Amino acid sequence: MGRRWIFDGHIAGIGTVSGLRTVVGVWHDSPFGSFSDVMVQQPSGHRLLLAPTPEVACFISETYSFDEVQVVEVRAALAGGTIKVDAGPLAVRAAIGARTLLGSALRTVPRRLAAHPRWLAAVNPIAAFAAPGARTFGSAGSGRAEYYGVSDLHHLTSATVTWEDGDAGALAPITPPVTFGFSSVPPQPSLARVRTTVVEA
């Protein structure tokens, strides 16, 4: 393997009845420090990245596929059983619920093993069965490979989502799956504890 980048934090997958789907990354530790980013797929299929700096925008847009990239202030926080996101045209307030059955199963795997690339490549077929649309390993942009090591998963039970000052509607499944890369998030709105490893081929 060549150069690698490791991102440790959380990913929230949120769908709404209007068809707006968002994937929020809240990264506590990364090569770019602590930051958050948002990937938005509109009902039309248009894919938009909201990133906090040009450097972050460049890396993410080289790894995933977007129709548009905006550098905006992105604020995201996990506190008091909620996730709050403010990013340019998007505002989210979502309630974090109980751990999912899959989350309970994931917690039985030692975290060091759960994030290891060889393990993630091996369990990729199982992940696809357990969470349709989701993958733990695949090819990314710029000749990179990517590994998602999920160690916990919680339901999101309700949300208020505002897009361009309009109500995007109530929480709904993320269908169809988002198409930023080889993997979507689980179909049901959720918050995952994750370590993402990106590797140069």
Image (cartoon, rainbow, N blue to C red):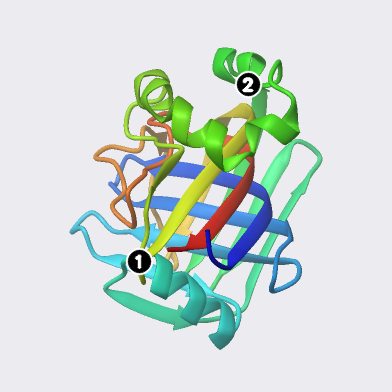
Cβ atoms under marks 2 and 1 closer than 8 Å: no
* Residue 56 seen by the camera: yes
Query: In terms of secondary structure, where does tag 2 sit?
Result: helix
Q: Is residue 126 above or below residue 33?
A: above
Count neighbours of disc 2 (C-alpha within 10 A) and say few if under 14, some if 14 to 19, many if 20 or more: some
Q: Is residue 189 above or below residue 11?
A: above
Give the residue drawn at x 62%, y 27%: 154
Alpha carbon distance from label 2 to label 1:
28 Å
The three-letter code of the residue at mark 1 reads Gly
The three-letter code of the residue at mark 2 reads Leu
Point out the frontmost of discs 2 and 1.
Answer: 1
| Residue lying furthest bottom | 54
Does residue 78 appear left or right of residue 149 in this picture? Answer: right
| Residue lying furthest right | 80
Of the pair 58 and 24, the residue shown nearer to us: 58
Does residue 88 appear left or right of residue 86 in this picture? Answer: left
Query: In terms of secondary structure, where does tag 1 sit?
Result: loop
Q: Quadrant of residue 144?
A: bottom left
Give the residue drawn at x 37%, y 59%: 140
Of the pair 92 and 155, the residue shown nearer to us: 155
Q: Which residue is mark 1?
A: 141
Q: Is residue 21 above or below residue 75?
A: above
Of pointers 2 and 1, the one earlier in the residue sequence = 2
Give the residue drawn at x 45%, y 67%: 165
Residue 193, percent from left and from top: 66, 38
Q: Which residue is mark 2?
A: 106
* Numbered badge on residue 66: none
Give the quadrant of the C terminus.
Answer: bottom left
Residue 90, percent from left and from top: 49, 64
